């Protein structure tokens, strides 16, 4: 069993989630090929560095992220800093020959993802990307139903990610709302999760027609930090939101299926509605992260004209049973991160390229590039691979 020594850059929501995921994985995945070791974390906030050592078990914490990459006792770097910092960190890790897990979408713009993918490919490092929702056991079951032909030929796909995080105009102007720190808005942030699920379940996309909008144009300025879940007060000084709240697109899949995708962060109502509906000639499935332990299934041969049946998550859908036995005993968001981390560490232990990795991230930003072009042109746009030699 190989020891995998881990460094983390950015110890906010996802840096902490992956640190817990890696630390918890051994007790859920007894039949594994690695031992994780939390070595060093970097964050610019002193309190977070202290938490990492005192409460998460890291051996040390540093201010300068270069020290994580340069550390001789680090095998893999988790990049969980704001999007616009990803590329510089990935390039440095690739140059040092360190494997990288980078949170989605790898950079803040399609161009940055292209640069990161190229650097990683040329360096021959193993990469992973944080498309965690595909690891939900019931999403895996949906894929099995599609791949085994239980739904027949897939004709229609509807993917959306409607999140509450920007629905309150008093939500702080954190890095996510600023083009220079986040890159694009929801097309970079949550649409990328939907595009991952669309590719995973149905396949590649060949052309798109897209549009976008920024509905809330000013937000309170953060004083002393704060994330996209924190709130200002009425009358606080405000600043301009510089990336989009909403993206919608119609698309044609390479296999001929037709699809629609939407992502929005400023809607009132949906809370964390990362969802899909897949329709085929023999049946359909529908899933919504807000009820991630339920999959709605309709197989025409079994339930003609009876409508959808609800299938509950449980230990018959691996690896749900690693976390909790029985049926309808729920798992949650961080369990998906733990599954994701386990799968990535298994790939590292085997020395094989991981999926989803930077190759997948590049495919998704090629779609994002087409939707941004379409928003500007007002016409259908073909998806071209942005891959560079
Ligand atoms: N897969 C998912 O479900 C999911 C969910 C949320 C965020 N994300 C992704 O994770 C990444 C981080 O998002 P988050 O929500 O955790 O953000 P966050 O703001 O909670 O955390 C970012 C952390 O990076 C630190 N940081 C900033 N500049 C730094 C620097 N120069 N060196 C070291 N640390 C620095 C900040 O102090 C902060 O602690 C983003 O790429 C985001 O797209 C993915």
Image: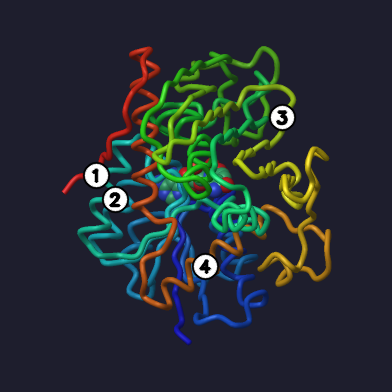
Which residue is disc 2 drawn over? Answer: 117
Which residue is disc 1 drawn over? Answer: 387
CA–CA distance between discs 4 and 2?
Answer: 20 Å
Task: Please report whichever mark, 4 or 2, sits nearer to the chain's N-terminal start.
Answer: 2
In the image shown, does 377 or 231 lie closer to the viewer? 377
Picture coordinates of residue 334, whole percent (x, y): 66, 56
Position of residue 79 in the picture relative to residue 70 (left or right): right
The answer to whether the residue labelled 2 contacts the one labelled 1, judged by CB atoms less than 8 Å apart, is: yes
Residue at 45% of width from left, 47% of height from top?
81
In the image shown, does 294 or 41 lie closer to the viewer? 294
Residue at 44% of width from left, 54% of height from top?
129
Which residue is disc 3 drawn over? Answer: 270
The yes-or-no answer for disc 2 within 8 Å of ligand 1 is: no
Picture coordinates of residue 23, whole percent (x, y): 60, 70
CA–CA distance between discs 3 and 2?
Answer: 33 Å
Local SS, label 1? loop
CA–CA distance between discs 2 and 1?
Answer: 8 Å
């Amino acid at each position: 069993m190989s020891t995998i020594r881990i460094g983390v850059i950015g110890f906010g929501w996802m840096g902490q989630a992956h640190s817990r995921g890696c630390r918890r994985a051994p007790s859920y995945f007894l039949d594994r090929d690695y031992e994780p070791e939390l070595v060093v974390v970097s964050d610019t906030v002193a309190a977070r560095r202290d938490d990492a050592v005192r409460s998460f078990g890291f051996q040390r914490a540093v201010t300068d992220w270069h020290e994580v990459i340069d550390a001789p006792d680090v095998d893999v770097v988790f990049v969980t800093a704001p999007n616009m910092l990803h590329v510089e960190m990935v390039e440095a890790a690739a140059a040092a020959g360190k494997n990288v897990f980078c949170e989605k979408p790898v950079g803040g713009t399609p161009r940055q993802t292209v640069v990161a993918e190229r650097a990683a490919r040329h360096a021959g490092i193993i990469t992973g990307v944080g498309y965690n929702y595909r690891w939900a056991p019931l999403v895996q079951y949906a894929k099995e139903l599609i791949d085994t032909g239980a739904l027949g030929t897939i004709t229609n796909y509807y993917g959306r990610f409607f999140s509450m995080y920007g629905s309150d105009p008093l939500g702080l102007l954190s890095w996510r709302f600023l083009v220079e720190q986040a890159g694009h808005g929801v097309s970079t942030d949550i649409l990328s999760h939907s595009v991952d699920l669309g590719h995973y379940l149905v396949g590649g996309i060949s052309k798109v027609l897209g549009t976008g909008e920024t509905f809330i144009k000013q937000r309170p300025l953060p004083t002393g930090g704060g994330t996209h879940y924190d709130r200002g007060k009425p009358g606080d000084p405000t600043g301009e939101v510089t990336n989009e709240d909403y993206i919608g697109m119609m698309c044609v899949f390479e296999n001929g299926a037709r699809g629609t995708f939407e992502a929005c962060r400023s809607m009132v109502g949906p809370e964390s509605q990362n969802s899909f509906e897949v329709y085929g000639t023999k049946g359909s499935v529908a899933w919504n992260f807000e009820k991630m332990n339920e999959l709605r299934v309709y197989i025409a041969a079994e339930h003609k004209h009876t409508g959808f049946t609800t299938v509950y998550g449980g230990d018959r859908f691996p690896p749900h049973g690693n976390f909790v036995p029985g049926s309808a005993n729920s798992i949650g968001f961080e369990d998906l991160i733990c599954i994701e981390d386990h799968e990535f560490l298994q790939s590292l232990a085997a020395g094989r390229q991981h999926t989803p990795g930077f190759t997948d991230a590049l495919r998704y930003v090629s779609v994002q590039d087409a939707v941004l072009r379409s928003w500007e042109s007002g016409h259908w746009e073909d998806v071209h691979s942005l891959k560079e030699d």
